[in-house]
Amino acid sequence: MLRLGFPTIGVTDVERAVRFWTSALDLTDSPEWATERWRTLVDSGGSRVIGLMRSESPVERRPRVHLDLVVDTTAEQEAEVARLIGLGATRIDWDDYPPKPDFVVLADPDGNPFCVVDLSRAPSGSAEAPG
């Protein structure tokens, strides 16, 4: 039976990516299949959440697939955006925001875009989100 696994993010610096994503999402770096080029990040129950794979390809400004991280309120979104920036994320100057966006576009330390979505205001026009 075919099942959806977990997203894998291409990164240039695996150790830096491990530090960012484990801190950002309160995950743990699992020893399972850990190599210089691959890491599996798991949640507190041991479920695989994200794979990190060393990649030589350039970051896509508008990737067709990206992560949406969700929060329940605008205040929580503002706090999480600030926390993620403190961890090394950067705010992307996104030119396709709808008039009242429910999402903020950030990039991880490797430049991979992702969104922080406020579910209390969703959807604002998810067709306008990265991708």
Image: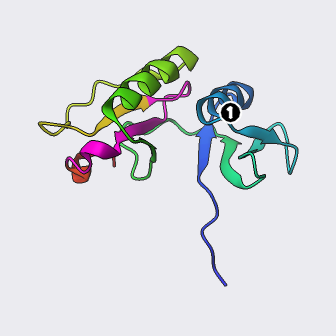
Reading the image, the residue beneath label 1 is 22
Image quadrant where one finds the N terminus: bottom right
- The structure residue drawn at horizontal position 55% and vertical position 28%, both measured from the top left corner, is 110
| Whether residue 106 is situated above or below residue 125 in the rendered picture | above
How many marks overall? 1
> Would you identify the image quadrant in which residue 36 lies?
top right
Q: Specify few, some or many for label 1: CA neighbours under 10 Å numbering under 14, 14-19, or 20 or more.
A: some
Magenta run includes residue 118: yes
Front residue of this view, candidates 98 and 65: 98
Q: Nearer the viewer, residue 111 or 7?
A: 7
Q: Is residue 28 above or below residue 94?
A: below
Disc 1 element: helix
Relative to the observer, which residue lies in front, 18 or 131? Answer: 18
The verdict on residue 74 being magenta is no
Left or right of 73, for residue 125: left
Q: Is residue 130 visible?
A: no
The amino acid type, in three-letter code, at marker 1 is Thr
Q: Is residue 73 above or below residue 7?
A: above
